[in-house]
């Protein structure tokens, strides 16, 4: 083998390629979010996104097949960030009821601040699917831990509680996308309903809702 010529299959090359693809995908997502904020999802074209990202038009289709698919990807990332952030503080991690209250508040505030979530909230089947795929599994692992610790007392099948919660959230998110000024009222009503689904006493749920109002982040 000639000196200085890289061997085929050089270790690390696939990783570099994967990182490069991830960076390009990230540029597209960031650019899309910027133009969504400016024009709304329905007012944005693929060209708008690629120009904002300073990428060739065809590059877009290596990662997404439509503007809607970019919006869906942004929502999935937002939901994952919310899920990862919940319980990051030790005091919150130790209190599953407070985790629920804070997580619900962050999710619903994202609906009024993220244009992709507002757009998606009008498509309930799609938003429910993303919730199931992105955060429902980990959220209900936390619920299962809360059942074991005595914080939650599910009245029936956990799978039914998951379905009821996801579809209930989907409906509340749609309502909020249409009336964003009601964010506080909708958030607190939805949280208290969810607490009842999880078997949390009303007084305990109300304390958690009050604490979530002043929680950092």
Image (cartoon, helix red, strand yellow):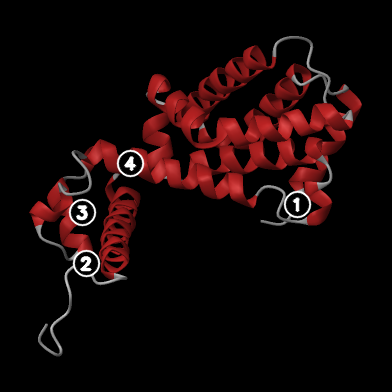
Mark 4 highlights which residue? 71
Mark 2 highlights which residue? 9
Disc 1 to disc 2, C-alpha distance: 50 Å
Would you say the residues marked 2 and 4 are in contact, meaning their CB atoms lie under 8 Å apart? no
Placement of 109 over or under 186, stated as above or below = below
Disc 2 to disc 4, C-alpha distance: 36 Å
Decide which of tag 3 and tag 1 comes sooner along the chain.
3
Mark 3 highlights which residue? 49
- In this view, the mark in front (1 or 4): 4
Residue 91 spot, x, y in % from top left? 83, 52
- In this view, the mark in front (2 or 4): 2
Decide which of tag 2 and tag 4 comes sooner along the chain.
2
Disc 2 to disc 3, C-alpha distance: 34 Å
Observer-nearest residue: 136 or 208?
Answer: 136
Placement of 155 over or under 190, stated as above or below = above
Q: Residue at x 88, y 22 (%)?
A: 201
Q: Which mark is residue 215?
A: 1
Disc 3 to disc 1, C-alpha distance: 35 Å
Q: Residue at x 83, y 46 (%)?
A: 94
Quarter of the rendering occupied by the C terminus: bottom right
Would you say the residues marked 4 and 3 are in contact, meaning their CB atoms lie under 8 Å apart? no
Q: Quadrant of residue 139?
A: top right
For label 4, the crowd category at 10 Å Cα-Cα, with few meaning under 14, some 14 to 19 and many 20 or more, is many
């Amino acid at each position: 083998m000639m000196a200085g010529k890289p061997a085929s299959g050089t270790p690390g090359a696939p990783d570099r390629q994967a990182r490069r693809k991830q960076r390009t995908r990230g540029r597209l997502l960031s650019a899309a979010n910027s133009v969504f904020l400016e024009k709304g999802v329905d007012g944005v074209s693929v060209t708008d996104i690629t120009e904002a990202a300073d990428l060739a038009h065809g590059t877009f289709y290596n990662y997404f097949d439509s503007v809607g698919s970019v919006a869906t990807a942004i929502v999935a990332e937002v939901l994952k960030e919310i899920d990862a952030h919940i319980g990051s503080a030790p005091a919150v991690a130790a209190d599953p009821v407070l985790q629920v209250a804070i997580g619900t508040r962050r999710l619903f505030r994202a609906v009024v601040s993220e244009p992709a979530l507002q757009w998606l909230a009008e498509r309930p089947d799609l938003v429910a699917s993303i919730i199931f795929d992105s955060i429902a599994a980990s959220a209900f692992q936390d619920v299962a831990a809360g059942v074991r610790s005595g914080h939650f007392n599910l009245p029936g099948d956990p799978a039914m509680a998951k379905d009821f919660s996801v579809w209930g959230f989907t409906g509340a998110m749609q309502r909020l996308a249409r009336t964003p000024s009601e964010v506080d009222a909708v958030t607190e009503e939805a949280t208290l309903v969810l607490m009842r689904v999880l078997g949390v006493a009303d007084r305990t749920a109300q304390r958690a809702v009050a604490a979530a109002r002043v929680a950092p982040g």
